[in-house]
Amino acid sequence: MTPELSSPTTQRWVLRGGRLHDPAHCRDGVVADLWIEEGRIVAPPPHAQGSGWKQIDASGLVVMPGGVDLHSHIAGPKVNAGRRIAPQLARHRPAAVPTIHATGALYAGLGYTTVFDAAIATGAAGLAHRELAELPILDKGIFLLAADDAAMLAALASDEAATVQRLVRQALEAGRGWAVKVANPGGALFWKHGRRGDHHDLDAPLPGLPLTGRLVLTRLARAVEALGLPHPLHVHTANLGLPGNWRTLLETMRSFDGIRAHLAHVQFHSYTGGNLDADTFGSGVEPLAEWFNAHPELSLDVGQILFGDTVAMTGDSAAAEHLAQATGVPWMSHDQHLAGGCGVLPIAYREKSLIHAWQWAIGLEWFLRAADPWRVALSTDHPNGAHFLAYPLLMRLLGDESFRREAFARLHPAVRKRSPLAGLTREYSLQELCIITRAAPARLAGLPHKGHLGAGADADIVLYRPSADLQQMFAMPAAVYKRGVLVAENGHVRAHPTGATLAAVAAG
Amino acid sequence: MVCEDIRLSGGAAEHACLHGQGAFAAALQAATSSAPLAWVRGAACPDAAAVARAVTQAAQRLQSARRVLVTGLGDATLEAIGVACDIAEALGAAVDAGSHEMAQTTGPGIARSGEVTAAWEEVRDRADLVLFWFHDPARSHPRFLERFVVPGPLAASASPTPARPLQRRTLSVGEAPVLPVGPHHQHLPLAPGHCLELTRALHASLAGCSPPAEAASSLTLARTLLQEAIGAAGCVAVVTQTEHASGLEAWSVAELVRRINRTKSAFTIPLENGLNRGGSPGANAAGAAAVCTWRYGAAGAVARADRLGGAFLPAEADACRLILRGEVDAVLAVGQLLPSVEAALASRDTPLTLVRVDDCLAQPAPVAADIHLACASLLCDGPGTLLRADGREVCLGPPVAISTAPPMVAVLTALLATLVAQRRTAAEGDAA
């Protein structure tokens, strides 16, 4: 049966008979109705049989809350640089770094209704918001790279907690940010002073300051916690992409010691090895996951890589330079005044590349070893690891062990031989996939009205046709509703409402 | 565009250089002039009704064209650029802002996509060696020197975390010294034709290789001096000109800076031509590139304005080619055009409708427009937003004077509204 999925013509409608996946309310495939009024999910009206409410038949369909992407890169100067740096990738359909309008349309077509850009320099926030104002459909927020700000570093150095809190608040207010992000703590300062390599140690003193990367992390995380911001400190730690960096990530996790923190794209920080020795390069996930699983104050997104061409972009210029030197491609970098900067370059992930195959396996290993899906957000660090349109493929890799094994068999032989992924048989259930793509990211972001289907939630609802092929199922939802309005249907965008900008601190 | 710190009081522009003083004086004078606000085929529109008819005619001509090109944009605020792009989308037009960002990704420039750059204040706060690389900002951007480079030895850094007190040294390479030669400034006189050769030779030296065999021996001294200066520096800024944004010279400079960057901080500071516009694409060229990129995925040469991703066709859809090949039969010129585009308009041999929306201060364009809609000068257009060439947002203050001409954004908005209304009327007519 093909259900009727037309847009509700009234502001009151009821979605009948769908199989609800709503982990926040422990509903795992329960058949039930959802009542929507003025863009919100509401409790069923007493004694109502639906009179006066438009009926939409969702029987046979899987119903989930709209997806929430906690860590993506979609706007601002570095994303614009990414659109330009590789014209050949801009010609792909979809482009490696889509236009702002296409970004909204493609995310919505995929069933996502909220997205965060995870790295905007404070000085670039105004321009990023100007661009995001043209992002259709999605609710959106930005994480500000406040830790590279010169005044902030001075306050962190003198351990003036009140001043740090005031500066965080001011930055969020001025930049209309949702959270605070650290990209390679202190790395921008090392970079700007020509101290290549010094950023590799969390305990190296920053140039001219009685401060280390570790102190940046802990003092800033405390400030974020003290301010009661919705999302904890969002941490891209030092040594991204370098062999042996699993120790840095472990030290980073240890530093927080009870303070809430979110670890970004951990895949890029979980490598063993060193001294450019390919034989020792490998996975450091096991001890990291062990620590992570035992520390509920921590959450993470993986930054999974998937094979293909893309563009890498980061607020960590040193990491971008290292990658550019390693791959020999042209790159761009821009340093902002009294703040950080960015590095951007094209990159191609290849199945037969030893390093890339390791990265692929390490990312999946993280997903499979992290015991509590409520502390995990699915991401590819778009576009760094892969395009967000690859999420359905990633979901199939997680939920279908035989499919994963087939993909694993195509990897570089050294990885097949040594990767612990070979021994991991866990499969994510539909409910767990629902958690890591919407319920958990919404909760981790601090969005009480998102990621669930309970009364009071935004009516951001996605209907999927169930299929054994999870990639097919998640690639093209039957219908996507944003605040109760049908915005996408079978991959076609039906409406372009303007989403809200999520700001943690009210201006003024 | 450098001078976001200018304050206007009593008709004077504080902090402005001579170029700026002149431009503001002219803007103030023009603001109160009673020049016509529109022309149709050279005839001035005498009153508001005639101006409205000109807008209607412009919309009709654009609407009835087979294919339209929207170009210029570099003299418009971000807000006005947005409306111009809306017009382009409504018409399915090609868009080419003609900025150096587009040039970077064309032809031989593809090899040098991307470069290492920094905000201008970073020159002031970090660079202890500034190289003026075959470009003289004293002519185009006197205040760039005043604010970010001079005086040489800095009394205090604006950065609260300086690595060490800066003792800045400057070195100009080119025809004339940028600053008076003295203890802090050295000049290496070289003709512009030596740019590529010297850059490659220096690059090779820094990489520990022998200079290219064909390198002129006359460059040896310059190369040695530069190598020593770079070796002694902690942070190197290389000031170049964006007019030469594509080609081997620009590529070699980008590669040179990347090479220096391997061992110490180094960045390029690309400058436009300033108010002496020459071949420069306008005060808000960076803004035009930014808006076009987030809307269409490219800074220019967009074959069709499509928010889902316009096709970037640098060898086909840049303004000059579209005009010269007769692929467009209407052009909406927003602000001043690049000299190359004006030349293409002048030499075209196919009929074409030209609609200009331009600063009332602008010099008469070489090619007369079929319809010319005048707007207030950008210098007294506020409020609005521009991007400085290094990407910093600059908010224009309130208007300098109440101009008789409307702001550019208002003119473009009226044109867009008229287009939409005409289309609706036509659709209703078809339906009936």
Image (cartoon, grey):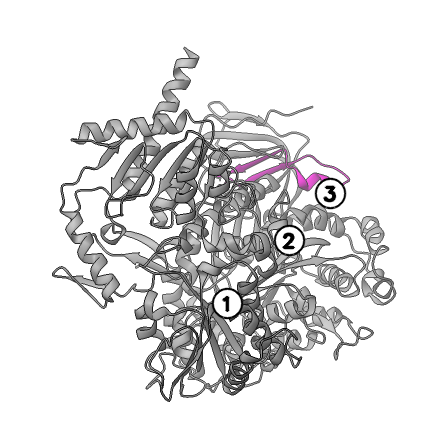
Name the kind of residue labelled 2 in the image: Ile
Residue A198 spot, x, y in % from top left: 59, 82
Question: Does residue A480 show up magenta in the picture?
Answer: yes
Q: Quadrant of residue B89?
A: top left
Asked if residue A154 is positioned above or below residue A16 in the image, the reply reads: below
For the residues labelled 3 and 1, the Cα–Cα distance comes to 61 Å
Which subunit holds the residue at mark 2?
A: A
Residue B416 spot, x, y in % from top left: 35, 33
Secondary structure state at the residue bearing disc 3? helix
The mark nearer the N terminus, 2 or 3, is: 2
The magenta span reads A459-483
Q: Disc 2 marks which residue?
A: A436
Name the kind of residue labelled 1 in the image: Gly
Q: Is residue A420 left or right of residue A437?
A: right
CA neighbours of label 1 inside 10 A, class few (<14), some (14 to 19), many (20+): few
Q: Disc 1 marks which residue?
A: B193
Q: Is residue B130 left or right of residue B41?
A: right
